[in-house]
Amino acid sequence: MIDQFLNYLRFERNASEQTVKTYEESLREFEAYLAFRDGGLSLRAADTDLIRDWMESLMDRGNNASTINKKLSALRSFYRFALKRRLVEKDPAHAVTGPKKTKPLPQFVREGEMDRLIDDREWGDNFKDVRARTLLLLLYEAGLRRSELTGLDDGDVDLEARQLKVTGKRNKQRIVPFGDELANALRLYQEARNEAVVRDSNALFVGDKGHRMTGRQVYEIVHRELTGVTSLKKRSPHVLRHSFATAMLNNGAGLESIKKLLGHESVSTTEIYAHTTFEQLKRVYDEAHPRA
């Protein structure tokens, strides 16, 4: 049956040899598993429970969810083919669901690293340096998405009330407060910007020619500046959003408050940061405790 299926992939579906090889490896592996079960079973005798048992054995051997789901996908395709060709009486793989992929924990810049970047780096008073420092402060102190930052206009910034009007996903607006440090930085930035360039819009952040900054321009600034203080593989504006949330949580803010500041619709989205801080706590414990 496996050979018939592989020929179907090659000659009727025009699948690549790599695809055929990958499917064959998964199917031969399942066939070998069945051969050792209950004195030897055939592919026709397999049922849903046996497939689940096989998946469990794959997990026990250290296969991750992505690998197991690929093998299960091969099995599903095989049994769909076999059922249509009447090679089997039922499709045992149809009702089997694969393991959920674990989402990677968000990466964040440590508070000490951000302090070094903002306070210890020698910033000039030229427009580019003032813009870069203000941009970094805003992302870190307000937890904005890149698109939210580039979408800000001067009218969205209330320096007296110390708050931003942010337009997030699906044009939902929220108010984000900020402190004196950021207020002073924004004031200095606006003064430097107005002297250096002529804007063609009311955009808060503009490029060297006065056009509203693009997401790519923001990314390049953040990536360049974070490279000097962190070894993280990701050094994007979103990492600063993660850093904002993690710093808030580490310093006593509740998940519900962080949810509102980030503009999340559900607190379950925000809970990932609780896992992040716990992982950080475990690392500290492992490094510091003499009997860890």
Image (spheres, rainbow, N blue to C red):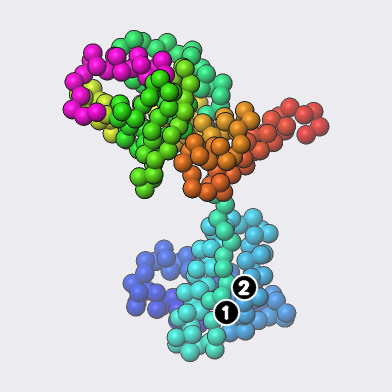
Q: Residue 183, relative to residue 92: is it above or below?
A: above
Q: In the rendered structure, which disc, 2 or 1, sits on the residue that comes first in sequence?
A: 2
* Other residues around mark 2 within 10 Å, as few (<14) / some (14–19) / many (≥20): some
What number is the disc on residue 92? Answer: 1
Q: Amino acid under label 1?
A: Pro
Along the line of sight, the residue nearer the viewer: 67 or 117:
117
* Image-based side of 209 in relation to 229, left or right: left
Residue 279: in magenta span: no
Residue in the image at 50% along x and 74% along y: 76
* Image-based side of 267 in relation to 217, left or right: right
Residue bounds of the magenta highlight: 183-202
Quadrant of residue 183 within the rendered picture: top left
What number is the disc on residue 134? Answer: none
Residue in the image at 47% along x and 17% along y: 180
Along the line of sight, the residue nearer the viewer: 75 or 286:
286
Along the line of sight, the residue nearer the viewer: 9 or 151:
151
User: What main secondary structure does the magenta stretch of the protein show?
Assistant: helix
Residue 36, position as x, y percentages in the image: 69, 75
List the residue tagged with mark 2: 51
* Other residues around mark 1 within 10 Å, as few (<14) / some (14–19) / many (≥20): many
Residue 69 appears in the rendering? yes
Residue in the image at 66% along x and 75% along y: 49
Q: Amino acid under label 2?
A: Ile
Q: Residue 47, relative to residue 120: is it above or below?
A: below
